[in-house]
Amino acid sequence: MYGVEAVTPAKVNLCSAKIATFALPQNERLMVEHLDLLEEYREAATIRLAEYQQKLARRYNRDVKMRGFGAGDLVLWKAMGNMRDTDAGKLAPTWEGPYRVTAIAGAFILNTINSSRGTAGQ
């Protein structure tokens, strides 16, 4: 391995076509044109996003079966978050009840079957 060294020239002239054809006045003009169109691009993106969200909601809600409740019906209450019994861990019951629907006034007025204490829910 004697006498062979890799030497790079001090100035390497490697440039892409984009750099070779760059013109500052043309670049400034194109930047101004793109800034003028920026609001249109944002509006088009907002419209596409709204259409996508509507399509997604239609697909998600397609298989939903609406279930109405009336006064006197028996229902279960879903125990969520801090409403669950923390001592039981992950084996705590997911549903509480049964409750009886006594009235509907924007929300359901629920009473437990054993007592007359009312609970509002939706």
Image (cartoon, rainbow, N blue to C red):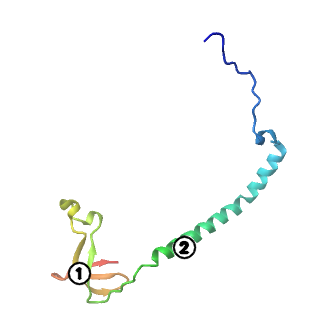
Relative vertical location of residue 112 with respect to residue 88 in this rendering, above or below: below
How packed is label 1: few (under 14 Cα within 10 Å), some, or many (20 or more)? many
Residue 81, image quadrant: bottom left
How packed is label 2: few (under 14 Cα within 10 Å), some, or many (20 or more)? few
User: Quarter of the image containing the C terminus?
Assistant: bottom left
Q: Is residue 109 left or right of residue 45?
A: left
Query: Residue 30 versus residue 9: which sits nearer the camera?
Result: 9
Depth check, mark 1 against mark 2: the one in front is 2
Query: Residue 15 versus residue 68: which sits nearer the camera?
Result: 15
Q: Is residue 113 left or right of residue 17?
A: left
Relative vertical location of residue 1 with respect to residue 103 in this rendering, above or below: above
Q: Residue at x 75, y 39 (%)?
A: 16
Image coordinates for residue 30, horizontal then vertical, percent: 79, 51
Residue 98, image quadrant: bottom left
Label 2: which secondary element: helix
Q: Residue at x 27, y 63 (%)?
A: 82
Q: Residue at x 26, y 66 (%)?
A: 83
Image coordinates for residue 78, horizontal then vertical, percent: 28, 72
User: Amino acid under label 2?
Assistant: Lys
Image coordinates for residue 57, horizontal then vertical, percent: 50, 73
As measured in the structure, the alpha-carbon distance from the residue carrying label 1 to the one carrying label 2 is 36 Å
Image coordinates for residue 86, horizontal then vertical, percent: 21, 60
Q: Identify the residue position indicated by label 1 in the image.
A: 99
Label 1: which secondary element: strand
User: Amino acid under label 1?
Assistant: Tyr
Q: Residue at x 46, y 78 (%)?
A: 62
Query: Residue 100 versus residue 8: which sits nearer the camera?
Result: 8
Q: Identify the residue position indicated by label 2 in the image.
A: 55
